[in-house]
Image: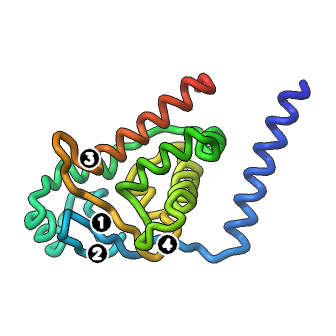
């Protein structure tokens, strides 16, 4: 009985804190994405990337950028949109643990702040916010919810995998870890 009360109390504190955070501060999310492919760097709007992820429609600049970087738009779109189901409360707990920091560090090698400072915190916030919306996360949601004006995405292909694929695989490992730890 006491265990259920403590768990309920934690959930209520988390939900209350989240509500206060969103009500007391203006929404702040990424507006620009800097795609990095080795020495090639191109900035585009999050809206432009989001439209591509949702519809498959490439803007002229995105089409040119992906062609110059020799990237397959279908593969990029798949990595951006494939959802990973997670429980937001358990996700928050795991991301605030040692294992969570390791996962955050690995994903932040692909998705990061321009300054490379506070990558863990920014990524943690984007993940939890994405999960709280619908119980799942995708790379495009993380990018859209990233709490800086600009977010960098490293899209270099390291044989045999694309960096976005590596980030997606880390999200899948996180999902598996949550299922193993909490039986959900």
**Image coordinates for residue 110, horizontal then vertical, percent:** 35, 55
User: Going by the image, does 116 lie left or right of 155?
Assistant: right
Circle number at residue 148? 4
**Image coordinates for residue 119, horizontal then vertical, percent:** 49, 61
Sequence-wise, which precedes: disc 1 or disc 3?
Answer: 1
Q: Are marks 2 and 1 in contact (CB under 8 Å)?
A: yes
Sequence-wise, which precedes: disc 3 or disc 2?
Answer: 2
Callout 2: SS = strand
The quarter of the rendered structure image containing the C terminus is top right
Callout 1: SS = helix
Sequence-wise, which precedes: disc 2 or disc 1?
Answer: 2
Sequence-wise, which precedes: disc 4 or disc 1?
Answer: 1
- Which residue corresponds to mark 1? 49
Q: Are marks 3 and 4 in contact (CB under 8 Å)?
A: no
Sequence-wise, which precedes: disc 2 or disc 4?
Answer: 2
- Which residue corresponds to mark 3? 78
Callout 3: SS = helix
User: Going by the image, does 1 lie left or right of 53?
Assistant: right
Distance CA(mark 1)–CA(mark 3): 13 Å
The quarter of the rendered structure image containing the N terminus is top right
Q: Which residue is at 31% across, 44% downward?
A: 166
Numbered disc in front, either 2 or 4 = 4
Distance CA(mark 4)–CA(mark 1): 16 Å
């Amino acid at each position: 009985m006491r265990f259920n009360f403590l768990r309920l109390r934690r959930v209520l504190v988390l939900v209350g804190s989240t509500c206060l955070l969103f009500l007391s501060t203006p929404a702040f999310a990424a507006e620009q994405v800097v795609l990095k492919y080795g020495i090639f760097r191109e900035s585009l709007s999050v809206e432009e990337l989001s439209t591509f992820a949702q519809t498959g429609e490439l803007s002229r600049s995105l089409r040119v950028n992906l062609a110059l970087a020799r990237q397959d738009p279908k593969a990029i779109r798949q990595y951006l949109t494939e959802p990973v189901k997670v429980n937001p409360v358990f996700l928050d707990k795991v991301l605030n643990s040692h294992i969570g920091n390791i996962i955050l560090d690995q994903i932040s090698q692909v998705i990061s702040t321009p300054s490379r400072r506070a990558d863990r915190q920014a990524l943690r916030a984007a993940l939890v916010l994405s999960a709280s919306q619908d119980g799942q996360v995708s790379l495009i949601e993380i990018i859209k919810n990233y709490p800086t004006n600009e977010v960098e995405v490293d899209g270099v292909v390291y044989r045999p995998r694309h960096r976005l694929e590596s980030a997606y695989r880390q999200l899948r490992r996180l999902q598996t870890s949550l299922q193993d730890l909490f039986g959900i």
